[in-house]
Image (cartoon, rainbow, N blue to C red):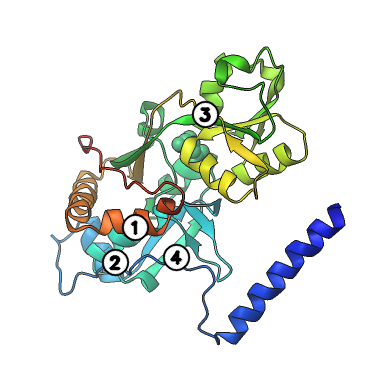
Amino acid sequence: MRLSHIARIAAVAAAMVLTATACGEQANLGSSAAPAPSVAQGVSFPAGTTMARLNEAGTLRVGTKFDQPLFGLRGLDGNPVGFDVEIAKIIAGKLGIPADGVTYTETPTRIREDTIANNQVDVVVATYTINAARKERVSFAGPYYVAGQDLMVASGNTTITGPDSLRAANARVCSVSGSTPAKNIEKYVDPANIVLFDVYSKCADALRNGQVEAVTTDNVILLGLVDSSQGAFKLVGQQFTEEPYGVGIAKGDVAFCQFINQTLQEAAADGSYQAAWAATAGKVQPEAPTLPPADACS
Ligand code: GLU
């Protein structure tokens, strides 16, 4: 049973490679169908700003997730695809940087502040909830989306119906260290039943293997994992927090924050924000979100 499943996966993978070869060397299995964001030509920015420096360099270093379908998932060409990646490309475009000037670094949940503070990336766009504790080390532009925490369980599970059902079910619940969902779930589950990994794909593996009964994080992250589970998982569908996603930047860079907020507003007005959604998360959740009002930059 298991072997035949593995054989099927291998056959599909082989077919994908064959298709790629048939399409020639330019085949790019990892790319999304998102239209390339427009690239500002001949723009100039006030001297000394982050925008001027990045425009001059022609490169934007982006921290994002590599294992989260719909938001940031590394494709076979090595580059990630997803809504977060498209947001990063829109920002790059307004800086006069084309998509091939964007470089990606994997930033799992717990290392995001460090990666910004150590100047390893210029922005982190990585399902990154804006909150006060994080604002002590980094600044945020946005929000550009508001998610909410939910639960994912095996599709046959009928006992877990929301966070309040977890204790009675004696459920082991998986999340990621340093995440807001890992913290929020503490009031619903005994500490011994909370299992933490560094990335959500490991939680999905643990659920598949029966090592935990539930995975908790933002609904849209779980939707991506459900979508790629071939029917094995389902979303419980009881959102119990609000998770406003921001673009993490160096602490105190108010001008860069304002520039990103302006960029997001223009993208919502010209349709590129909605197109980015449609090409990524929109495949599972068709209705495009409305850009939330920006927070004040600080
Ligand atoms: N949005 C939540 C957070 O920033 C969960 C998603 C994640 O771990 O990236 O902690």
Q: Quadrant of residue 144?
A: top left
Q: Residues within 10 Å of mark 1 (few under 14, many from 20)?
A: many
Q: CA distance from mark 3 to mark 1?
A: 26 Å
Task: Name the residue that disc number 4 marks.
Answer: 32
Q: Nearer the viewer, mark 1 or mark 2?
A: 1
Instruction: Assess whether mark 1 and mark 3 are in contact (beta carbons under 8 angstroms).
Output: no
> Could you give the CA–CA distance between mark 1 and mark 2, rounded to whole angstroms?
9 Å
Q: For the C terminus, which image quadrant?
A: top left
Residue at the spot 21% in from the left edge and 43% down from the top edge: 254
Q: Ligand 1: does it lie within 8 Å of the C-beta at label 3? A: yes
Would you say 60 lies left or right of 240 here? left
SS of the residue at dot 4? loop
Badge 4 or badge 3: first in the primary sequence? 4
Question: Which quadrant holds residue 154?
Answer: top right
Report which residue position mark 1 lands on.
Answer: 276
Describe the element under mark 1 as helix, strand or loop.
helix
Q: Residue at the location (70% across, 68% down)?
A: 12
Q: Which residue is mark 2?
A: 37
- For ligand 1, tell me if the residue under mark 2 lies within 8 Å: no
Q: The residue tagged with tag 2: helix, strand or loop? A: loop
**Which of labels 3 and 1 is toward the front?**
1
- Amino acid, disc 1: Ala
- Residues at discs 1 and 2 in contact (Cβ within 8 Å): yes
Type of the residue with mark 2: Pro
User: What label sits on residue 38 in the rendered view?
Assistant: none
Q: Is residue 86 visible?
A: yes
Residue type at mark 3: give it. Answer: Pro
Estimate the x, y position of residue 137 in percent, counting from the top left: 39, 36
